[in-house]
Image (spheres, rainbow, N blue to C red):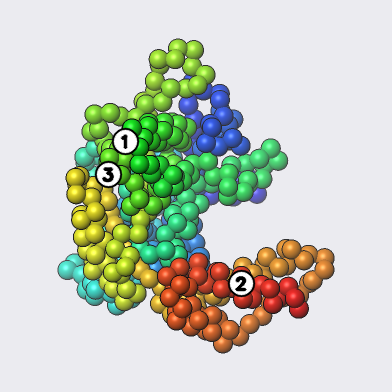
């Protein structure tokens, strides 16, 4: 009933007091009538979706879960944190369990670090007992890097779906995932230009978009895709937006403000920032450990970005490794299930059957893709394309 739903989703009252204008980035959402809704069970939702929707990427999944656990802990205990009431029902014991489970899984998969210098309990205590007020608050920043089609963008979407709750419509029902107005995805390639003056114009556009987003929903998930394609000056500006000691902090001018010059400060310390790149992707392999993969990505980042430190990109790397043959087979299973569901929707009332297949089929798809350089280079997208081109026509003709 209503009480059960309330225990899962709590609304965070962070809507501005100055504006009744619907945000341009989300025309279906009015923050004056529907505040930015957050999910209180974020870590459980995240763990479930990563396990069931992402093929392989155990190292990435565990690193993300650990980072999110630490971030939620800080949000719970930071002085005057507006998120305390959202995550307040989460016990310290459950946080420790999630963190230790992620650490234990990362160790048990046989990667480069097979043993820890301290017990899991000691490691967890050391991390969680750091006072949340130490140092100036800053957002959670993660850099996903790896080849095409291995789940980077999809994982970023999962994080957004886990952190944010879908707003209610007029009938009290949850809106579709596309109405997650606390999510902002930016294709950085759209800001690439050869004109010298365009960088500053792009900086202005990005600052304006981020300021509006965070003014309306400070706990937003901001996704900057293909960061390797933009000039260093633009990348510097993106990172600078989230630095607590930035000389040029973000501010927002409400379109409905009577006094145009009035600008409101923007909270940047509560958001989650995900930068996505393909740095180091040609040197990564499915068998690499996390530290080895991070080193490969870091070395290419340092050689690519010569004129600035990009510390946020170098110290929060989450490697996404190429998919093995077994992981490609897992993707094949996912794609066949998606194909079956799609056919059932399209031919509802005409066909009431169900697609079935043997493991030989998924194994064949995985082998074909693993042996075809074009398909393999596209990772999971290559499997998706194979299923669409090779199997969908056959299914529709029968």
Instruction: Pick the residue in front: 147 or 340.
Output: 147
- Counting residues from the N terminus, which is met first, the one under dot 1 or under dot 2? 1
- CB of mark 3 within 8 Å of CB of mark 2? no
- Please give the residue where the numbered disc 3 appears in the rendered image: 232
Label placed on residue 31 = none
Tell which residue pokes out farthest to the bottom in this image: 360
- Dot 3 or dot 1: first in sequence order is 1
Q: Nearer the viewer, residue 77 or 246?
A: 246
Image quarter of residue 207: top left
Q: Secondary structure at mark 2?
A: helix
Instruction: Name which residue lies at 20% across and 44% down.
Output: 308
Tag 2 residue: 389
Q: Is there a contact, CB below 8 Å, between mark 3 and mark 1?
A: no
Residue 120 place in picture, x, y as percent: 26, 66
- Asked if residue 314 shows in the view, the reply is no
Q: Is residue 309 left or right of residue 345?
A: left
Q: Which mark is residue 196?
A: 1
**From what the image shows, is residue 324 above or below residue 46?**
below
């Amino acid at each position: 009933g209503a009480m059960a739903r309330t225990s899962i989703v709590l609304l965070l009252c962070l809507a501005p007091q100055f504006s009744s204008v619907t945000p341009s980035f989300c025309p279906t959402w009015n923050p004056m009538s529907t505040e930015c809704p957050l999910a209180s069970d974020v870590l459980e939702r995240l763990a479930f979706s990563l396990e069931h929707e992402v093929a392989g990427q155990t190292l990435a999944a565990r690193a993300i879960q650990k980072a999110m656990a630490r971030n939620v802990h800080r949000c719970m205990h930071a002085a005057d944190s507006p998120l305390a009431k959202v995550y307040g029902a989460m016990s310290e014991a459950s946080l420790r369990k999630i963190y230790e489970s992620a650490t234990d899984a990362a160790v048990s998969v046989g990667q480069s670090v097979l043993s820890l210098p301290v017990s899991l309990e000691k490691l967890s205590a050391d991390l969680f007992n750091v006072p949340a007020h130490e140092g100036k608050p800053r957002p959670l920043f993660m850099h996903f890097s790896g080849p095409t089609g291995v789940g980077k963008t999809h994982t970023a979407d999962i994080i957004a779906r886990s952190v944010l709750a879908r707003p209610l419509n007029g009938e009290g029902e949850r809106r579709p995932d596309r109405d997650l107005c606390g999510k902002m995805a930016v294709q950085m390639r759209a800001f690439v230009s050869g004109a010298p003056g365009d960088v500053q114009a792009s900086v202005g556009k990005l600052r304006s978009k981020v300021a509006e987003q965070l003014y309306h929903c400070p706990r937003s998930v901001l996704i900057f895709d293909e960061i390797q394609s933009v000039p260093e000056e633009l990348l510097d500006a993106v990172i600078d937006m989230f630095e607590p000691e930035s000389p040029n902090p973000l501010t927002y001018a409400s379109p409905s403000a009577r006094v145009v010059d009035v600008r409101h400060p923007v909270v940047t310390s509560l958001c989650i920032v995900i930068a996505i790149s393909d740095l180091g992707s040609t040197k990564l392999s499915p068998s690499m450990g996390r530290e080895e993969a991070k080193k490969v990505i870091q070395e290419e980042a340092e050689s690519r970005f010569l004129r600035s430190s990009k510390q946020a990109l170098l110290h929060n790397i989450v490697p996404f490794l190429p998919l093995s043959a077994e992981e490609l087979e897992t993707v094949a299973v996912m794609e066949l299930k998606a194909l079956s569901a799609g056919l059932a929707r399209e031919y509802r009332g005409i066909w009431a059957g169900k697609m079935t297949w043997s493991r030989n089929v998924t194994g064949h798809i995985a082998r074909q893709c693993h042996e075809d350089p074009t398909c393999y280079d596209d990772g999971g997208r290559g499997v998706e394309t194979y299923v669409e081109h090779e199997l969908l026509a056959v299914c529709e003709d029968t």
